[in-house]
Every structure is written in C-alpha cells, then in structure tokens.
Amino acid sequence: MDQEKVIVIDFGGQYNQLVARRVRECNVYCEIYSYRTDLEEIKAMKPKGIILTGGPNSCYEADAPTYQKELFKLGIPILGLCYGAQLMTLILGGQVESAPVREYGKTKVLIDEDSPLFKNVSKTTVCWMSHFDYISRPAPGFTVTAHTADCPVAAAEDRDRNLYAIQFHPEVLHTKEGIKMLYNFVKGVCGCTGDWQMERFVEKSIEEIRKKVGTGKVLCALSGGVDSSVAAVMLSKAIGNQLTCVFVDHGLLRKNEGDEVEAVFGPQGNYELNFIRVNAQERFYVKLAGVKEPERKRKIIGEEFIRVFEEEAKKIGTVDFLVQGTIYPDVVESGLGGESAVIKSHHNVGGLPDYVDFKEIIEPLRNLFKDEVRKAGLELGIPEYLVFRQPFPGPGLGVRIVGDVTADKVRIVQDADAIFREEVAKAGLEPAIGQYFAALTDMRSVGVMGDERTYDYAVALRAVNTVDFMTAEAAEIPFGVLQKVMGRIINEVGGVNRVFYDLTSKPPATIEFE
Ligand code: XMP
C-alpha cells in the first residue's frame, strides 16, 4: 500500500514548515511544494489532501502567486490558510480586498456553524491572525463558519466540494485549538488513517538501504551530532561494517566530546562499523592562529575539515556511496522544496562531495524534520543523551571564542561550559532551555584575586528559549544558579576573572557569538 500523503502548496508563508510538521504530528506524511509545481505533478502524487499556505502578497495583484483553477476540481480536499484562503476565494469567484482593520496577533474567533473542521473546538476560541487583506465576500457555494469582531469571514467552507478556507493560522501554537483543526482536516475531512509511523519508516529505510548498497562500500562523516549519529546507526544496522565512519576531532569540540563519540561508535562501542577518529586539533589551531574575523574562521574550519576528511577517504580508496545527514528543513531552506528564499546554502545540501571518489549519495534522513530524526534515533536504540543533544555548530567552539582561537582559550571555554552544563542539569533546568553554553569574549579586564591584581578574560554565559532557532529569548535562570556557576568558573578555570550572563534576545543578537 502506498503511503498516505498530504501536500502543502507554499505561497511563501513564513510558517510553511510548521504546517507540514503539524500534519506529520497527526501521523500523516506531508511534503511542501512551491506554488510553481505543475498540476500534473501534484496529481501524480495522489495526495489525500492539499493545504495552501499563507504568503506575503495580495492575491488580487497582477503578479501575485496563484494556481490553476483546475486544482479545485480534482475532488481532493483543500484547506486554504490566510493567503491560501483568500486565493481560493478569489479563484472561485468570491471577493478579497484590503481590510478596513488589519488584524495581527491573538484574536477571539467565534464559530458560527457546525463544521467538520471545528469538531470538538470551543464555540469561542483564540486564533493567531496576521493579515491586511480579508475575504469580503465568500465564493459561491461557500458558507461562512466563523467570524471575528473585525473579520466577517474568519472561516468559510463548501462542504460538498471539500474546500475549506480559514483566515487565521492553525499551525502556530498561539492558535489554541489549531492542532485540533488540522487533525480534523487530515483525519476527518481527508480520511487519512495515520500511517506515518517512525517504526515503519526506520524498518523501510533499512530495507531500502540494504537493497541500494548491495555489497558496496559506504563512507560517512560522523560529527557526533544528532543527524549524523542517527544516519550512521541506521546505516550500521543495514549494512554493518561495509560502513566506515570518519570522525574528525578538530579540537573545537565540547569538553570530553571526542572521547564520548568514540565510546559510542568506536571499537568498544555499541555498533558494527569501521570507526576512524582523526585527531586533527593541532592542524586546526595552526590554521586559525591569529585569525579574528568570524567568517574567515568559519571558512578555514570548513575547508580544513574537508581536507582532513579527504585524506582519510583517499586511504580507504574508492567508495560506492557517501552518506549525508541532510534533513528536510535543509532541503526546504535550500530552495529545493517549497517557496522559501534560499536562506542559507546549507553545508549538507549540494556541498561536500566533489572531492571524494564515490558513485552516489545516500541521505537517509532527507524527508525528516528534526523532532522526527530524534524519534528515529530512539527507535534505533541510540542513547537518549545523544538523541536529545543540543544543537552544536559545525565550526564548534570556533564561533564561541570571540577573536582569535588558541588552545588555551579552547581549554577555558571547554571548562567553563562543562561547569555551566553540569550546574544547569543539577538544578533540573535542562528540559526547559533550548540551548545553553559558555562562550569566551575577547575582553580582558582588571580584577583582584587573593591579594593579587589579575588581568584576565571574561566568560559569557548564554542560555536561550527558542522553538525554531530563528528567534530566541534569554532564558530565566535563577540567580542562585548563575551565582554558583560564576563562583565555580572563577575558582576552577584559570585565566578568567569575570562572568557575564547574556540577556539579549535574537534578534537583535544571534544565538552563537560569531
Ligand atoms: P545563530 O547563531 O545563527 O544560531 O542564531 C542558530 C542555530 O544554528 C546553530 N548554528 C550553526 N549550526 N553550523 C551549524 O551546523 C553553523 O555554522 C552554525 N552557526 C550557528 C546555533 O548553534 C543555533 O542552534
């Protein structure tokens, strides 16, 4: 049986990935496609339902993104959100115009009619609105099912044709019962049974990898991060020691991290694979000596990493496949799916391979969101501490040391960071904080310790709450915990005489320091 699928057609909305993630949380597989995707292509995928996203345009303007009217005649249930709702209305003969009152933020929505979309939803509910246009007249055949004080058509539907239009955003958590509405759409309206299960995905992927690889040799760059770890374990379960993992220790890892990765994946570890650890610390420190400019540092680290990896790959000889830990947001953000502008050319997509002799790439996590990668990791039996690791940037501590990098500064930031992590864990704060770490500023200042004058570095502690890492707020760590961390860092880490706590949100700051 084919996998059930719901398709998100993206009109440039900022929440496009969130829509797909929410659908998958209902155990229904969902992919994002640009509004430029051909109708025939959409039809060929046999989706059980289609969701049209929001977008920044006015749908009645000449060059605004649109879609063929035939989409609405396929007999496939369609849900339009915000711009998607307006576009559906306009195409089907209703009216959309600039709203006399713009709505932005949490808004009280009154449900007027029974609707399959609003099953088990309260008659008065709070939804997230963000629009300057509104539906002033629904399309013929549509019934208005909800309104707000300023928006006469907050929701409308043509139940006979299974077409649903809602002005607000059910995918964001500010819409209190939004997940219920999306569940009602995919399960109730589209009739999906919910066959997207991680257990099945893992089994199927292992089978497919076996079939694809045959007796071939596979090479994987293992960083110890969540994505590459899950990819490596999946490969190891599928093909055992036909897999070689190369782990480059660039000397910019957290304290003891290199040994921890080796303990799990190395010869004494849990998996059948060939593990090669390259201790390349010195090489990186030499290349980075005296370099202060952040982008140059990143570039040097990236290039040196490739060089080390290349040398190891050459020792192995020709391999048949190269594994990459690409995940779905990388694909979408690289402009390969959906309508997102190219936010960053991600190092995992279309990056690495031209320097290693191989025939094909394997990307076993290409269709998964981060939380699904973690679920797959648990399914594969990977230890929880690895699966729930915080994000750690590829350039490692290189971007947490402001200014030039030296072995001594790496030691300072590693030790301070280990103390910070230990104390946060001890205080039981860990689950609530998105990401936290110590960084080293390039500020030195005068202090006094014992009876001596010191002239030492300032460590900065950073802890943020974030859902998507695009925006973040400084986490409220109890003052007592911060004081304890400060005391321990000053006493235990040589070369530090001041500790700051970074209160800045993102924006204007970023999460990392460089
Ligand atoms: P920023 O500093 O941009 O970080 O607010 C957002 C998230 O991305 C991580 N990050 C990186 N991850 N390579 C990575 O793999 C990088 O160069 C990189 N820079 C930042 C950062 O840790 C945070 O989670």
Image (tube, grey):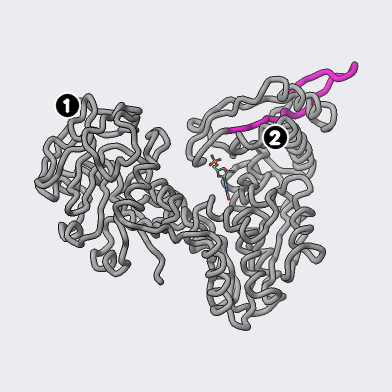
Residue at 31% over, 60% down: 48
Residue 398 located left or right of residue 135: right
Give the mark toward the camera: 1 or 2.
Answer: 1
* Residue at position x 72%, y 35% in the image: 425
The answer to whether residue 60 is above or below residue 126 is below
Q: Which amino acid does the dot numbered 2 rest on?
A: Leu
| Amino acid marked by disc 1 | Pro
Crowding at dot 2, Cα within 10 Å, few <14 / some 14-19 / many 20+, comes out as: many
Residue nearest the viewer, comparing 310 with 215: 215
As displayed, is residue 385 above or below residue 496?
below
Residue 160 position, x and y percent, is 17, 52
Name the quadrant of the C terminus: top right
The percent position of residue 116, horizontal first and vertical second, equals 28, 45
Q: What type of secondary structure mainly makes up the magenta span? A: strand
Q: Is residue 446 a member of the stretch shown in magenta?
A: yes
Q: Residue 227, which numbered label?
A: none
Query: Measured from the top left, where is residue 301 in percent x and y?
Result: 64, 53
Q: Decide if residue 282 is on the left or right side of residue 512.
A: right
- Marks 1 & 2, CB-CB < 8 Å contact: no
Q: Which residues are magenta?
A: 445-464
Image quarter for residue 54? Answer: top left
Residue at image position (65%, 70%) is 237
Whether residue 218 is visible, yes or no, is: yes
Q: Position of residue 243 (x, y in %)?
A: 67, 73
Q: CA distance from mark 1 to mark 2?
A: 51 Å
Is residue 55 rendered magenta in the image? no
The secondary element bearing badge 1 is classed as strand
What residue sits right under mark 1 in the picture? 100
Number of the label disc, if any, that sits on residue 440: 2
